[in-house]
Image: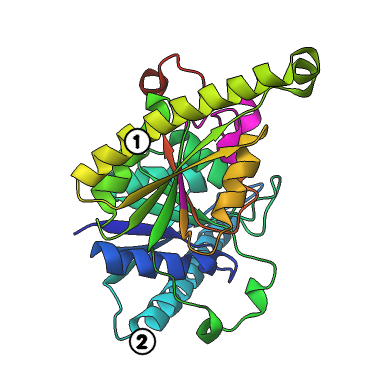
Amino acid sequence: MKTILVALDGSSFAEATLPVALGLAKQLGAQIELVTVHEPMPGRHNISGSSAHEHVLERELIAARHEAAVRALDAVRDRIMQRADAPVVTTTVLAGVPAERLLKHATERGASLLIVATHGLGGLSRQWMGSVTDALVRHATIPIVTVRPDASYESRTPDARAEWTLRRLLVTLDGSKAAERILEPLQALVPTTVAYQLLRVISPQNQLLRALTPTSEHERDLAEQRQAATNYLDEIKARLQAAGVSATQRIMTDSVVAHAIADCAHEPDIDLVAIATHGRGAIGRLALGSVADKVLRSTDKPVMLFRVTTDDAGTEPAP
């Protein structure tokens, strides 16, 4: 049975992942494992000179934190189990650096997917949720689904939180083999009843070049890009349809690729955005020309990120 790990930190913000997790568990026939991680206690890294009393106190504090985390996860599990269609749900409390422990546990469990909440703002977050997302994506070997709750989420009661079902997903492609790697986990995980919307964004010449070249040349360049994109998406669509997957294609023109992806993602029939990322770059931001990072921070739809290695990516340019 597939296992979906859901990272929680005790906040209702992090619980925004639950509708997505439950929807995917139902569609994939998977079990859910709720996981939380205790960070090291600040200022307590070196206790070699501490008194026996301080050692006992620290152990008691750690035990109390662990028990509180167990109770919190058990409460979430009990709430889920009240549903008639509840999947198998287990809970795990870990200790250590959150991203490192989550990734290690995902490997040990053979998890298929890790779901995590993110505020999509950068910098420090509520609890530890959100701040670990970049680190997870940089090093994960399984797909990461990020959920960005809207501002009103924490004011809602659990009963008011809508259920979530994956019916149509947006697959972002840039013409490279690296970007196509997102299709592998999708086809391994997602039922063939889910429709794919394939998206390729083409970019017009920048304003300076447009000012220096005739309009006819600019239009010819766009037409050539569009034809190449059409041929490329036709090939991908045919491959998916041969595997029994319903797929449509769309080409958008925008000088900022992430803006076009976000605009397409906002359409009501899109339930999830899927994008490959190198998962590396300056100050830990996502790569692929920062497209994945910008999409993650600009859409309220769940985003599946799948890290590709340098060898996978090759030397092909990303958007």
Looking at the image, residue 261 lies above or below residue 299: above
N-terminal of the two: label 1 or label 2?
2
Q: Nearer the viewer, residue 43 or 152?
A: 152
Label total for image: 2
> Which residue is labeled 2 in the image?
82
Provide residue 28's location: percent of width, then percent of height.
26, 61
**Point 46% across, 56% down: residue:** 272
| Tag 1: amino acid | Asp
Q: Which residues are magenta?
A: 273-293
Residue 49 appears in the rendering:
no
* Circle 1 or circle 2, nearest the eye: 1
Q: Quadrant of the N terminus?
A: bottom left
Label 2: state its secondary structure. Answer: loop
Residue 69 horizontal side relative to residue 149, left or right = left
Quadrant of the rendered image containing residue 91: bottom left
Instruction: Please tell me how crowded label 1 is: few (under 14), some (14-19), or many (20+) other residues with Cα within 10 Å.
Output: some
Instruction: Please tell me how crowded label 2 is: few (under 14), some (14-19), or many (20+) other residues with Cα within 10 Å.
Output: few
Q: Which mark is residue 163?
A: none
Quadrant of the rendered image containing residue 61: bottom right
> Which residue is labeled 1 in the image?
234
**Point 64% across, 48% down: residue:** 297
**Point 28% across, 65% down: residue:** 27
* 289 in the magenta segment: yes
* 270 in the magenta segment: no
Label 1: state its secondary structure. Answer: helix
Residue 12 appears in the rendering:
yes
Looking at the image, residue 224 lies above or below residue 260: above
| Tag 2: amino acid | Gln
Q: Quadrant of the C terminus?
A: top right
Provide residue 119's location: percent of width, then percent of height.
64, 56
Q: Nearer the viewer, residue 123 or 159?
A: 159
